[in-house]
Amino acid sequence: MTQSFTLPAHLKETDLSNLLKQMWQIRFFEEKVDEFFAKGMIHGTTHLAVGQEASAVGSIAVLEDRDKITSTHRGHGHCIAKGAEVNRMMAELFGRTTGYCKGKGGSMHIADVDKGNLGANGIVGGGFAIAAGAALTSQMKNEGYVVLCFFGDGASNEGSFHEALNLASIWKLPVVFICENNQYGMSGPAKEMMNIEDVAKRADAYGIPGTVVDGNDVFDVMNGVSEAVDRARNGEGPSIVEAKTYRWKGHSKSDAKKYRTREEEQEWRAKDPIARLRDVLIQAGLLTEDGAAEIKAAAKKEIEDSVEFSKQSPMPTIDDLMEDIYA
Amino acid sequence: MRELTYLEAVREAMSQEMRQNEDVFILGEDIGVYGGAFGVTRGMIEEFGPERIRNTPISEAAISGTAVGAALTGMRPILELQFSDFMTIAMDNMVNQAAKIRYMYGGKGKVPMVLRTPAGSGTGAAAQHSQSLEAWMAHVPGLKVVQPSTAYDAKGLLKAAIDEDNPVIFYEHKLCYKTKSDVPEELYSIPLGQADIKRQGSDVTIVATAIMVHKSLEAATELEKEGISVEVIDPRTLVPLDTETIIKSVKKTSRLVVVHEAVKRGGFGGEIASVIAESEAFDYLDAPIKRLGGKAVPIPYNPELEKSAIPGVEDIIMAVKETLNRQ
């Protein structure tokens, strides 16, 4: 299936390859995690972002290094896009000391504060105000960074959404709220849980821009987000960018997906954001078939290596239990 | 030395700290020209301006989360909640975010914020504006909980709380605001986790918090007339708790009465009693430990009912006598 893309004019070829690579890394990471959960090799729970790679990668691609993000329970993709080391991510899921949280956080709490990843969040809607606070620091200290706050369609029904967006808008905070509308909040279809089609429309209530982008088109995401980021950086305040997308997997590991049809899933699989990017790059002459295969293979190998790294990493000991509670 | 009210001492600690540390700022509802619900920040916006004395919308969920996000990125926010009852709206940010971020992230990131809030009954504000909910917060690992009873302690403890690299809940009892004590003009710090012996005695130990420290001292003065020597200990901080001072005192007096305004059932007094029951001081006890706390009832409006919902001086006197078998 061929779909139209709007190539962002300012991008270099190398950036484009990296977009594809990151999307493959996310896909392979999530598939590996899915496999390990099924086999009982890692415990707890996890929320996979397969199918949503373009919204994470496209949004973060337009950031500068100094910019920050807050993420969600479905946060592996955001971490990878923000430059996290997959070794340390996988090690975290294995509960090892080499993991981002030394095995204390797991899937829902991966963070790399020094690198501007202020953390995934196990509380739906937990990131809105934290992102606003990080943006307030940028504003008060004149640091010039912008904060991207990822959230889902479900989180937009939390009270924290309203409070934080109102606050961010009256203070003109440099934050962009990225709604990854994957159509379902756990089993709750967005169309049943809110009386409007677009979360972006809620922006009107705060006097800020709200735009809808094709969340499975990495370039459309980039175009939409970069406009909002520029606006935030220029001191004009926050925006909502809503990326329409779909999670291919269930909500978490124990989801029988009774609330949606296999036909619907197939429709969205046909809009695979990775295949679309690959095809358009090849059509545009920016990538060869071989080049695309190399990128895919390299990403796959990195994920496989991360598994080895994790398996060889040490487990925390009982001595670690009571460490890191207080600074 | 000059005298200050408790309220003035809180304000002075914040003002002096803000003069020397640009990262410290206050946010809260009506803290600007209005001066805060109890007048604690009166005059501060004139000195520090609206950037650092940040008047917020009525959005406890947003402002608590914004404080967390700002703290995580390098600021040292002081959040004023108008009434500690409103903690329910800020609860997610304090309990699920602020308290846990450092641990969840494996020791990376810190949340140096102070949540200041007036607590307690005695103002006729009835059930939703009069509670003492400090035990809730003391239950959560990752938070520190401070409850000063005097102006001197309020200033020194607030300075220490602002300097903390961890989230601190700072309870100000409304009836303490007008109490006066000698307060040094210079900024000083009282380390968190150091109890204060407010009165030396040899027959019975009273451990009391907040306004109950004043009532216990009043009771001790009365009891002295009957030849009963009471030692009054104010833990000042519930987390960390100075168990050593309490245990030492009980070993000396062999009798313990614990008094707080918060509802007795599930209150922090149970923790203090347990500390003694589990310690070497248990063998020194000559009488069962007495716990005094609020009745298990919402705080009523009628002034007589309101008074009778919490321990009074007479109740404390009677409890002390009971431990001495002298009624």
Image: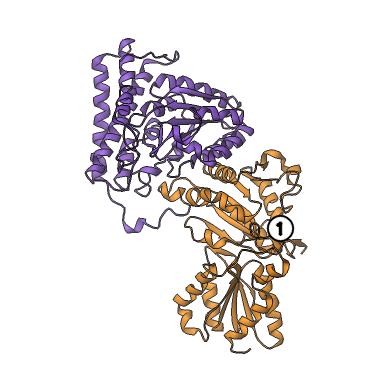
Chain colours: A purple, B orange
Residue B214 pos. (x, y %): 68, 71
Closer to the camera in the image, B185 or A68: A68
Q: Is residue A102 above or below residue B327?
A: above
Q: Is residue A55 left or right of residue B205?
A: left
B159 relative to A69 in the view: left or right:
right
Q: Is residue A36 left or right of residue A103?
A: left
Query: Which residue is painted at 21% across and 44% down in the image?
Result: A39
Can you see residue B201? Answer: no
Q: Amino acid at mark 1?
A: Ala
Q: Which chain does the residue under circle 1 lie in?
A: B
B245 to B12, vertically: above or below: below
Q: What residue do we see at 26% from left, 24% from top? A: A296
- Which type of secondary structure does the marked residue at label 1 adopt? helix
Q: Give how far across and how far down residue B70 sits, in percent.
A: 56, 41
Query: In this orientation, does residue A208 appear?
Result: yes
Q: Pinpoint residue B90: horizontal percent, then vertical percent.
A: 56, 49
Residue at (55% x, 64% y) in the render = B238
Q: Residue furthest left?
A: A39
Q: Which residue bears the numbered disc 1?
A: B9
Q: Is residue B311 above or below residue B301?
A: below
| Image quarter (top left, top right, bottom left or bottom right) of the N terminus of chain A | top left
